[in-house]
Image (cartoon, rainbow, N blue to C red):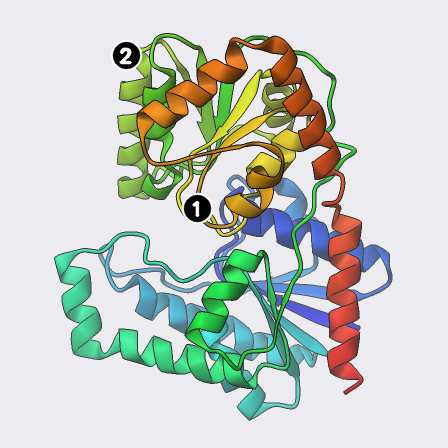
Amino acid sequence: MKIAYIYGHADTRGGVERFVLETATRAMKLGHEINLFCNSLPYERTYPEMLNIPHEIKRARRNFLGYFKAYFGFKGIKKIIESAIKWRPDIIFLQSGYGLAHHIQRKTSIHVIPYIHGTFQPYKRSFVRDIYRNVLGIEELYARAGSISFKTSPLILCNSYHTKWVILNFEPTAKTRVVYPGIDHEKFKPIWKDENYLYYHSRYQETKNQLQAVRACGSKYDLILSGFVAKEFSRQFQYYLQIQKEALKFGHKVFSNINDEQLVHLLQNCSVFLFPSINEDFGMAPIEAMACGKPVIGHNSGGTIETVGKAGILCSDAVKDWEESISYLMENEDIRKNYGKEAYEFSRQFTWENTVRQILQSFEEVLNK
């Protein structure tokens, strides 16, 4: 099969980039022809191995003075889709720009399958943002485009049942299927060490809720935070500085933009992994922690309920709830070890081989209809 991956800006080391890297690489090894179409792919910010995937970059403006990101994002995705159509793939595999699926199917006979990583919640609202989006009718346009695309897509792959439920609530007639992301168990594996600290790794932004982890640990337990931050994105960087300042009050360590080797080391040696991210659609980080044999405490929302809720502890928004759960595990070594063993066994069902197999089977089903 010829498969065109569509993803706007592959410029972080996040879950979507990990998904593209792992699934595209494995599909190529199975003999499929892959091409990644994107607006940016900077070596210094994404996973370096991403550049080993055949790719075509069509540069596009991301915003105007920090505004109109949705408008320019739409234009950028459309630009790379036009390039992908010229490549004449069997499948266009959308990682973003889901509302353009109908546009592609109307112009060509190419089958379009979205993989839904997120459920369209705005990162941050503002007065200016709401004004221009209402004046331009962007919200209505996106809702209409999304609804038509989900109605007409032959199949929509979702990263969790939480994501699937959001899609079906938005468009009840959509044909959906859950295909969980995987874990590289050769890389993320237990060494059964415990150096008496808590750990949280995630991109620095408000919904990831790093402040909850900092305040719950307080000065009683050592905490290490790490994650991606792009300094040129001032809002994200300002949040990172806020976290850094708050963490230093308690003597916690804060790292940014670590590599995979550092991530694995911190996971393998921590006592407990924290995941206070709010309404996470899937959450790869807690599964990676589980694969390292670590107990996980997560926020009782979104896709975290499907993962951490099966082998860890879920907490509400209340800091006291987190404090009690942390103390329960940190003060009881045997219980902590048992949770870690159960977490490891649970993680073994998540493999990239299973993910790729299900994706390719889905593609074949669509092509053979």
The residue lying at 78 percent from left, 53 percent from top is 354
- Assess disc 1: are there few (<14), some (14-19) or many (≥20) residues with their C-alpha within 10 Å of its C-alpha: many
Density class for disc 2 (Cα within 10 Å; few <14, some 14-19, many ≥20) is: few
- Which residue matches tag 1? 301
The N terminus: image quadrant:
bottom right
Is residue 289 toward the left or the right of residue 251 in the image? right
From where the camera sits, is residue 50 visible? Answer: yes
Near-viewer residue (201 or 331): 331
Q: Check the picture and name the quadrant holding the C terminus.
A: bottom right
The structure residue drawn at horizontal position 38% and vertical position 66%, both measured from the top left corner, is: 73
Lower sequence index among marks 2 and 1: 2
Quarter location, residue 156? bottom right
How far from the left and from the top, in percent, is residue 80? 52, 71
Q: Residue 256: in sight, yes or no?
A: no
x, y percent for residue 331: 52, 8
The quarter of the picture where residue 358 lies is bottom right
Residue pictured at 63% horizontal, 76% vertical: 155
Query: At label 2, which amino acid type do we have?
Result: Lys
Report the side of 169 relative to 47 (left or right).
left
Q: Nearer the viewer, residue 45 or 205?
A: 205
Q: Residue at x 66, y 70 (%)?
A: 4
Q: Secondary structure at mark 2?
A: helix
Q: Which residue is mark 2?
A: 249
Which numbered mark, 2 or 1, is in the foreground of this view?
1
191 w.r.t. 242: above or below = above
Q: Amino acid at mark 1?
A: Ser
Dot label at residue 87: none
Query: Helix, strand or loop at disc 1?
Result: loop
